[in-house]
Image: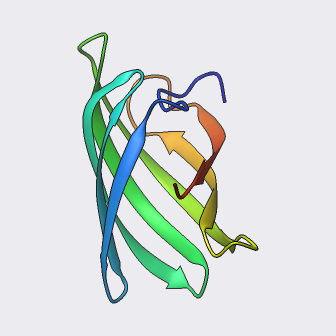
Amino acid sequence: TGNGDVNDHTIFYYQQEGELVWADYSGGSVRRGNLIARWVEENLLEMRYQHLATDNEFRTGRCLSRAEILPDGRLRMHEEWQWTSGDHSTGTSIIEEI
C-alpha cells in the first residue's frame, strides 16, 4: 500500500520460539526496525512494530498477518496493518520468504 514504508528492498530477519515471533528489519524507506508477534490462530500472527524511517521519523503500528504456505514450501504473509503513530491510516502488504 502506498502509505507504508516497507517495499521490495526491505528485508526482515524472523525468529521464533513456540508462539512467540520477533524480527529485525531494514532497507528501502526503513533505516532500522523491529517487531514482536504471537500466533493467535494456527496461521494468524498478531504483531506490533516500530522503526526509524529514512526521513528520520519514528513510526509504530500493529498488524494481523495470515500465513500461506507456497507450493515450494516458502511462506507468504498477507498483512493488514495500521499505523499507531502519525495519521493512523491502514494498509495491506504481502511479504514472501526468500
Query: How has the structure been colored for display?
Result: rainbow
Q: Is residue 34 left or right of residue 41?
A: left
Q: Residue at x 40, y 21 (%)?
A: 29
Q: Residue at x 29, y 64 (%)?
A: 22
Residue 95 % position (x, y): 58, 50
Residue 52 % position (x, y): 25, 27
Q: How many marks?
A: 0
Residue 14 % position (x, y): 34, 62
Location of the N terminus (image quadrant): top right
- Residue nearest the observer in this picture, 33 or 82: 33
Q: State which quadrant residue 59 falls in.
A: top left
Above or below, 63 relative to 10: below
Above or below, 24 relative to 46: above
Q: Hey, which residue is sitting farthest front in the picture? A: 72
- Residue nearest the observer in this picture, 16 or 85: 16
Q: Residue at x 61, y 80 (%)?
A: 43
Q: State which quadrant residue 44 falls in.
A: bottom right
Q: Hey, which residue is sitting farthest top in the picture? A: 55
- Residue nearest the observer in this picture, 17 or 86: 17
Q: Residue at x 58, y 31 (%)?
A: 89
Above or below, 26 relative to 17: above
Q: Hey, which residue is sitting farthest right in the picture? A: 71
